[in-house]
Image (cartoon, helix red, strand yellow):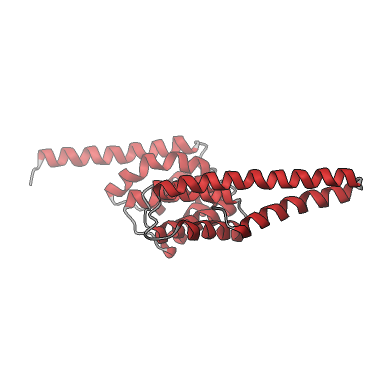
Amino acid sequence: TVPFVVLVEVLVVGLARNHVAELAAGTSAAAFAAAVFMGIRTGIQRLKEFSAAMAEVRTIMDESVISFEDANKAVSEMALAVGASEVEVAKGLYQTLSAGVTDAADAFVMLEGATKLATVGVASTGDAVNLLTTVFNAYGKAVTEQGVAKTSDMIQKTIQLGKTTMPELAASMGQVLPMASQLGVEFEEVAAAVGALTLSGLSTSEAVTQVTAVFTAFLKKGALAKAEFPE
């Protein structure tokens, strides 16, 4: 069930946007009435999309930890706070839970960090969730506000100092981070290497492939050394 406050908010925003546009154009009362109708229809459509997105969340959410109603409210409040749509944030919550962050408190910590990262990184919440959960899963890190903030800062620096984007990093980092974790190479070092390689003219995927090749060579040498000099 969609909270009444969300219904009112969506309808008011839809009406207000159309009202301002129509007044600015100096249109007639009939045109304004049409704008009101369009605002209502848009609001209803957004509510349907939000309800559908939260219904998907409910299929994998542990309601013994947080009620569905509280989750609805939290998603709406988070969307309002960061200026994102409720639908996008709801889909981000589903993605967070499905990525293995099943504890409700941890999921909302991760989701809040992702929505903020998406805003400053000019990307979707989905891309931010994908990248953050990839990092945390690869290194087996516990989800904390400090950890999410630190990882987000490193991602922002990589984007700012390299020639890459968050969607590109989100699509590529899963290839190299598990191997980096195995070798004890921290995410900050991987991100710095990828960023530097993009500055040399490589695409993000090419840069990640080169770093992966280096790690693969180290792992092969380690395997050969163990075979030649068994403990």
Q: Position of residue 160 (x, y in %)?
A: 56, 51
The answer to whether residue 205 is left or right of residue 49 is left
Residue lying at 60% horizontally and 48% vertically, measured from the top left: 122
For the residue pair 42 and 175, the one nearer the viewer reads as 42
**Residue 182's spot in the image, x, y percent?**
27, 47
Query: Number of numbered discs present?
Result: 0
Residue at horizontal 58 percent and vertical 56 percent from the top = 79
Vertical side of 45 occupied by 186: above or below? below
Q: Is residue 82 left or right of residue 130?
A: right
Which residue is nearer to you in this view: 15 or 195? 15
In this view of the protein, can residue 67 be seen by the observer? yes
Give the image location of residue 8, x and y in percent: 67, 57
Depth check: give the residue in front, 135 or 24. Answer: 24
Image coords of residue 54 (percent x, y): 50, 49
Residue at figure coordinates x 44%, y 51% from the top left: 132
Q: Residue at x 47, y 51 (%)?
A: 93
Q: Is residue 164 left or right of residue 223?
A: right
**Residue 128 visible at all:** no
Of all residues shown, which one is farthest toward the left?
Answer: 231
